[in-house]
Image (tube, grey):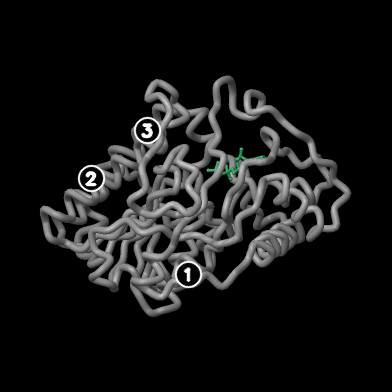
């Protein structure tokens, strides 16, 4: 495979690069390093089959140049994290809409099959017991910028789907459900690395709202091989596929679990949504994937439970603290 990974210096993207390089593929990353970091790519950068191009997916001619000659594009570059979206709604929207259009257009015009990373956010406030891929989107008002990420990602899916259908070029849309792992930073939201850092520093654990909202966290190490397998699975083409974990937990329950696994003496501090994200913020109360489709297509069966996921973050943060010069957070 001659692959391009947009957003390859980010959390999920860099793990994908590790996997592709380890499996003998050629990889070019396009990343503007706005939220990603070169240190995430330290290992793969040693390999002669790897190249990092620093630049934006909003730069149409650069995107086209980078994709020319490749056979596969993994599009992971995006403005992500609730804080990023809430603090910079317009820039996030621009990147997530036009950036994806540029990448998909270039992939199609150069005949490269492509994967577009989407998110469980597209289901909005639908709190069904196991969201299947055809579940309805329940979004709040379009005038609330909080919903801009979900709205943009929904349009990204449409762009990918329509281009894929019209061109006949293989395309896969992956919907990630709260994926967690080493290299993820808590700076832009992402609750697990935040709680682990707080616990390791004996700072208060900041539970937003009442902590009764529930999530189902998935390991990055389970989803990366799944993403690559989906690209080789014709039955997955032009479909959106849920990928995530199976163990549901409340955010208060997550805080307790982090405290238990770190042995920290941190207190739990309840923070109102208004104080956390600004007035009028609407959280999703529940987000639970139904992964029957992934299971059927590629025998997807996640191996890591919540304790494994939290432990991997604890080990990563401890190693980082021991070597501050390589810190990523
Ligand atoms: N959250 C929290 N404390 C934090 C960060 C997040 O209680 O310091 C909550 C957040 O309100 C949400 C859940 O944890 O209910 C997951 O947040 P994250 O940003 O990781 O992902 P989301 O599911 O919101 O996209």
Q: Nearer the viewer, residue 176 or 71?
A: 176
Q: Is the residue marked 2 within 8 Å of ligand 1, measured from its CB?
A: no
Q: Are marks 2 and 1 in contact (CB under 8 Å)?
A: no
Q: Disc 2 to disc 3, how far (Cα)? A: 15 Å
Residue 176 picture location, percent across and down: 45, 54
Q: Is the residue marked 3 within 8 Å of ligand 1, measured from its CB?
A: no
Q: Disc 1 to disc 3, how far (Cα)? A: 29 Å
Residue 285 picture location, percent across and down: 57, 39
Question: Residue 159 got which mark?
Answer: 2
Residue 60 picture location, percent across and down: 23, 43
Q: What is the crowding at mark 1: few (fewer than 14 residues within 10 Å), some, or many (at least 20)?
A: many
Mark 2 vs mark 3: give the one in front.
2
**Residue 124 location, quadrant:** top left
Q: Residue at x 47, y 37 (%)?
A: 125
Q: Residue at x 53, y 56 (%)?
A: 179
Secondary-structure class at tag 1: helix
Q: What is the crowding at mark 2: few (fewer than 14 residues within 10 Å), some, or many (at least 20)?
A: some
Question: Residue 93 got which mark?
Answer: 3
- Quarter of the picture containing the N terminus is bottom left
Identify the residue position indicated by label 1 in the image. 18
Q: Looking at this rendering, what residue extends furthest in the bottom direction?
A: 24
Q: Earlier in the sequence, mark 2 or mark 3?
A: 3
Q: Disc 2 to disc 1, how far (Cα)? A: 28 Å
Q: Earlier in the sequence, mark 1 or mark 3?
A: 1
| Residue 258 appears left or right of 168 | right
Q: Note whether residue 95 is visible.
A: yes
Q: Nearer the viewer, residue 87 or 32?
A: 87
Residue 280 picture location, percent across and down: 55, 21
Secondary-structure class at tag 3: helix
């Amino acid at each position: 495979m001659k692959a391009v990974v947009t957003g390859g210096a980010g959390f999920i993207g860099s793990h994908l690069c590790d996997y592709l390089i380890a499996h003998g593929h050629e990889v070019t990353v396009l990343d503007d390093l706005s939220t990603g970091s070169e240190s995430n790519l330290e290992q793969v950068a040693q390999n002669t089959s790897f190249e990092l191009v620093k630049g934006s997916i909003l730069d149409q001619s650069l995107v086209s140049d980078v994709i020319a000659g490749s056979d596969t594009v993994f599009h992971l570059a995006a403005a992500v994290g609730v804080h990023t979206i809430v603090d910079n709604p317009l820039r996030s929207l621009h990147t997530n809409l036009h950036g994806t259009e540029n990448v998909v257009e270039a992939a199609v015009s150069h005949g490269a099959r492509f994967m577009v990373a989407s998110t469980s956010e597209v289901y909005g406030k639908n709190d069904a017991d196991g969201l299947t891929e055809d579940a309805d989107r329940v979004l709040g008002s379009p005038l609330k910028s909080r919903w801009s990420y979900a709205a943009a990602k929904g349009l990204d899916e449409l762009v990918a789907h329509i281009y894929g259908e019209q061109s006949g070029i293989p395309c896969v849309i992956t919907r990630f459900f709260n994926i967690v792992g080493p290299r993820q930073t808590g700076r832009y939201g992402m609750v697990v690395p935040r709680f682990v850092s707080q616990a390791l520093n004996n700072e208060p654990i900041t539970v937003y709202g009442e902590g009764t909202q529930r999530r189902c966290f998935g390991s990055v190490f389970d989803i990366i091989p799944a993403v690559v397998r989906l690209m080789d699975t014709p039955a997955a083409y032009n479909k959106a596929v849920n990928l995530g974990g199976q163990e549901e937990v409340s955010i208060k329950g997550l805080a307790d679990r982090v405290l238990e696994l770190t042995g920290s003496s941190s207190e739990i501090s309840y923070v109102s949504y208004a104080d956390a994200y600004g007035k009028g913020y609407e959280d999703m109360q529940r987000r639970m994937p139904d992964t029957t489709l992934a299971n059927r297509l590629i025998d997807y069966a996640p191996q890591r439970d919540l304790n494994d996921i939290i432990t991997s973050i604890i080990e990563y943060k401890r190693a980082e603290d021991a070597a501050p010069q390589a810190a990523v957070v």
